């Protein structure tokens, strides 16, 4: 795995949190069961996983 410095990881966290927030604002506007809704739910979950992994990397440094 590539190693990133602490500043890069913290910037990635800020960016991902911002993206999650924007996705969560759009989600209620999409009809449940549509492909757009499903895709957005999966993207949010993927970003949450990424945040977990980045935070773990920061703790392990």
Image: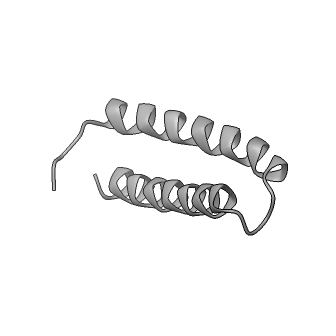
Q: Percent x, y for residue 3? A: 18, 46
Q: Hey, which quadrant is residue 5 in on the image?
A: top left
Would you place residue 46 above or below residue 5 in this image? below
Q: Percent x, y for residue 2? A: 16, 48
Residue closest to the eye, 18 or 3:
18
Residue at image location 35% in from the left, 30% down from the top: 7
Residue 25 falls left or right of residue 56: right
Residue closest to the eye, 51 or 19:
19
Instruction: Tell how many labels.
Output: 0
Q: Hey, which quadrant is residue 23 in on the image?
A: top right
Q: Percent x, y for residue 46? A: 49, 60
Residue at image location 81% in from the left, 58% down from the top: 31
Residue at image location 83% in from the left, 52% down from the top: 28
Residue 38 falls left or right of residue 1: right
Quarter containing the N terminus: bottom left
Residue closest to the eye, 39 or 16:
39
**Colour pattern:** one colour
Residue 28 falls left or right of residue 24: right
Q: Residue furthest bottom?
A: 33
Residue at image location 28% in from the left, 51% down from the top: 61
């Amino acid at each position: 795995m590539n190693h990133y410095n602490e500043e890069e990881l913290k910037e990635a966290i800020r960016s991902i949190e911002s993206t999650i927030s924007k996705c969560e604002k759009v989600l209620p506007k999409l009809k449940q069961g549509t492909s757009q809704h499903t895709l957005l739910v999966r993207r949010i979950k993927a970003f949450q996983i990424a945040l977990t992994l980045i935070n773990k990397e920061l703790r392990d440094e």
